[in-house]
Image (cartoon, rainbow, N blue to C red):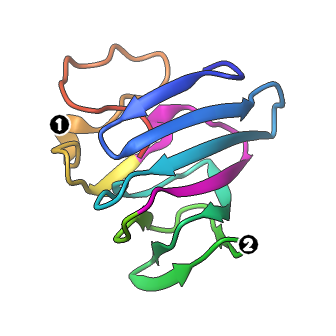
Amino acid sequence: MTEGEFSERPWGNYTVLSDDASDHKVKRIVVHPGRRLSYQRHAKRAEHWFMVAGTAQVTLDGTVTELTPGQAIDIPMGAAHRIANEGADDVVFVEVQHGTYFGEDDIVRLEDDFGRAGPENQPTPAGSPAPARSGGGGQG
């Protein structure tokens, strides 16, 4: 993934804002009304989410918190998390990933609205051949 890369997903989209550092990556993420990212965890990175627009419901290890513009939350490495948009307007937030690895194959989906959870839909480790799969793939 390169800086400035834009990716459309079933829940919304993201744009990579910074991708040139070895210890962090920054994304702008948009979640459309009525959508949510998969309930997931990461082994090699923590995340910091800063809300820019809309009202989000963030689930962190089973606890739901509502966040509005100007608020932020830290997602520790290994914590189960997701963000949902139950409002009428887009939710926009900036995600700062911090850790040792930022590849999409560090996503373990615990639940997913788009059929991407479960062992048959998990990303493969870097360097391994990826199984054929359909659906949104990638981030959240």
What residue is disc 1 on? 120
Q: Position of residue 78 (x, y in %)?
A: 53, 62
Is 130 drawn above or below residue 101 in the view shown?
Answer: above
Q: Position of residue 136 (x, y in %)?
A: 28, 33
Figure quadrant of residue 83? bottom left
Residue range (magenta): 89-107
Residue 97 highlighted magenta (yes or no): yes
Q: Position of residue 125 (x, y in %)?
A: 44, 28
Residue type beneath disc 2: Gly
Is 71 drawn above or below residue 121 in the view shown?
Answer: below
Residue type beneath disc 1: Glu
Using residue 100 as the reference point, say whether residue 136 is left or right of it: left
Image label count: 2
Residue 24 highlighted magenta (yes or no): no
For the residues bearing labels 1 and 2, Cβ distance under 8 angstroms: no
Figure quadrant of residue 25? top right
* Lower sequence index among marks 1 and 2: 2
The answer for how far apart the CA atoms under marks 1 and 2 are is 38 Å
Query: Which residue is pictured at 40% across the width and 57% down the height?
Result: 40
Q: Which residue is farthest front?
A: 88
Query: Which residue is pictured at 67% across the width and 52% down the height?
Result: 94
Using residue 74 as the reference point, say whether residue 36 is left or right of it: left
Element type at marker 1?
helix
Q: Position of residue 88 (x, y in %)?
A: 37, 66
Packing grade of label 2 (10 A; few <14, some 14-19, many >=20) is few
Query: Which residue is pictured at 40% across the width and 43% down the height?
Result: 12
Query: Which residue is pictured at 48% across the width and 27% down the height?
Result: 7
Is 64 drawn above or below residue 80 in the view shown?
Answer: below
In-front residue for pair 35/123: 35
Element type at marker 2?
loop
What residue is disc 2 on? 70
Q: Quadrant of the N terminus?
A: top right
